[in-house]
Image (spheres, rainbow, N blue to C red):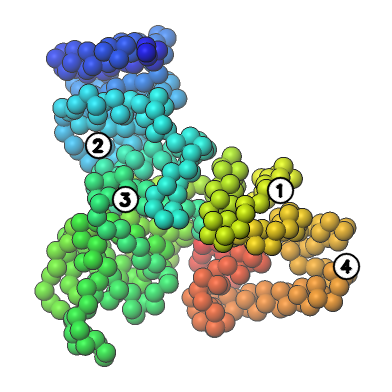
Amino acid sequence: MSNTANILLVDDEPGMLRYIRTLLEVDEYKVETASTGEEALERVQKGLQPDLVLLDLLMPGIDGLQTLEQLRQIRPGVKVIMLSCVSDTRKVVQAIRLGAHDYLTKPFQKAELDTVIDQCLGTNQQNYVGEVEELCDDVFFVAASPAMRKIRSQSALVANVDIPVLLLGESGTGKEVVARLIHKLSPRAHRTFLKVNCAAVPADLLESELFGYEAGAFTGATHPKPGKFELCNKGTILLDEIGEMPPILQAKLLHVLQDQQFSRLGSRSMIKVDVRILAATNINIPEALANKRLREDLYYRLNAFTLQLPPLRERKEEIPILLKHFMSRMSEQYARPPLPLSPVLLQATLEYPWPGNLRELSNFIKRYLVLGDEKLAVQELNPKNDGNGAHFNGGLHSPAEPSGGLKSLARSAKDEAEAEAIKQALDQTNWNRKQAASLLQISYKALLYKIRQYGLAPTRSSGNRLSAGA
C-alpha cells in the first residue's frame, strides 16, 4: 500500500541523507531533502508543505533547534522528529519545549524510524485519539482533546530522558495518571513506581517515610527501616503535593536530586540510589516561591521539564468517553448493570464546570449508578432548579424559599453553619489549611473538599498565601 505523506529530510551528512531517504522511499513516502537549516526554511517559505520533517540537531550555520523554532513559526502545525548522533539531555528538553514530536538517536534501525513516523502521522493505533489507554489497575489515560494529546506526546518524549518532571494542575486533573504514564513509557517501566503524598503524611513522619531510619533513631524505632527512596531504587517516585513538604525536608530532597544519595535518620553513612523523581502540585508556584514555602533552588531542580494539565472544563470533548469508561468500570465493580447516559444527562455533564475535575466526575457516576435516578443526577449538576421550580443559591436553599420542606431547611442551615465555621477557621489561621484542619478536627483532604464544595475564597484582607483551590 502506497504512502501519500510528504516528508522533508534535513541533514548535513550526504551519506546519512541517502541512507534515511532510501529507508523512507522503500515505504513509498514522497521525500524532499535539504542539507542545511537555511535551505529547509527557504523551501518551506516558498510553498513546500511537508506532513513531517526529519530534522538533524547538529548542523553548521542554523542548527536544528534554531531551524525547529523558525519552522514552527512558518508552519505551526507541522510535525517534527529530531535526529542526533548524541543523546544530549539539555537539547532534547529544548527540542520538546520548542514543539518537537519525537527524538531519534543515530544510528537507528528502520523499525525505530517506522515506529516514530507512524506515531507522528497517526498511521497506526498509537495516536490514542479518543481511546482509553490502560496503565494499571483502575488507572487509565484519555487523550481525546488537543491539549491531552499534546500531554501524551510530551510524556512519551520526556519519559526517555532521565530528568525530573514537575506536574502542575488543579486537584483531580490526573497528575498521578500522567506520572504513571511517564513511568510506563520509560526504560524504568519494569521497575518500582511509588507515590508519596507529602500532605497526607505528618511532617514529623515524612522524613522517615522517605529516607528510612536506623534502630534507636527515635523512641519506638526498634528495627531499621528502609525509606521509599531505597525501596524505589532504579525505579520512579512521585512526590505528590510537593508544595506541602516542610522546608527542612526540601533541602534534603535537593541533596538527593543533586547527588543521588542521602542518609537514614540516625545514621551518618550515605546511601546511593538511582531514582527518577516526578513531583506534582496544585499550588500557585510564584506565590509559594515569594513566600518561601517552596525553595527556589528545589523548584528549579524539579522544573527540568513541566507539564501543565488542563482542567476538565477545558477538555470537555473527553467527558463522554470518561463517563462511559467510569460507568463500565463501576458497574463491574458494584455488580450492577450499567445505566444509560441519555442526551439530557450528557448535556448536563457538558454544561457543568466540574471544579473537582476527574475525581468529581468519577464520584458523580458512582452516585448515579448506586441511586439509579437520572432526574436526581441531572438536578445535582444543575442545582439552581430542582425540577419543581425551587431555586437554589450557591447550592444552598434560600431561607425565603423553603420549597424543600423541613429536611431541606435543616440541611441548608447545617451547610451554612459549616461553611461559616470553616471560613472562620481559615481566617483565624491566615488561610493555613493544615492549621485550620487541625483546629476543625478534620483531615486536610476533607478541608480541601469542603473549601471547593462551598466555594470559599480568601479575602484580600485575610493575608492569605495560597488560593482556596490550591
Quarter of the image with the N terminus is top left
Tag 1, which secondary structure?
helix
| Horizontal and vertical percent position of residue 190 | 25, 51
- Amino acid at the residue labelled 4: Ser
Disc on the earlier residue, 1 or 3: 3
Above-or-below relation of 332 to 147: below
Q: Nearer the viewer, mark 2 or mark 4?
A: 4
- Amino acid at the residue labelled 2: Lys
Residue 403: assigned label = 4
Q: Is residue 216 left or right of residue 384?
A: left
Tag 2, which secondary structure?
helix
Disc on the earlier residue, 1 or 2: 2
For this rendering, which residue is in front, 331 or 166?
331
Above-or-below relation of 24 to 387: above
- Amino acid at the residue labelled 3: His
Label 3 sits on residue? 183
Residue beneath the point at 15% across and 27% down: 107
Residue 91: assigned label = 2
Disc on the earlier residue, 2 or 4: 2
Label 1 sits on residue? 345
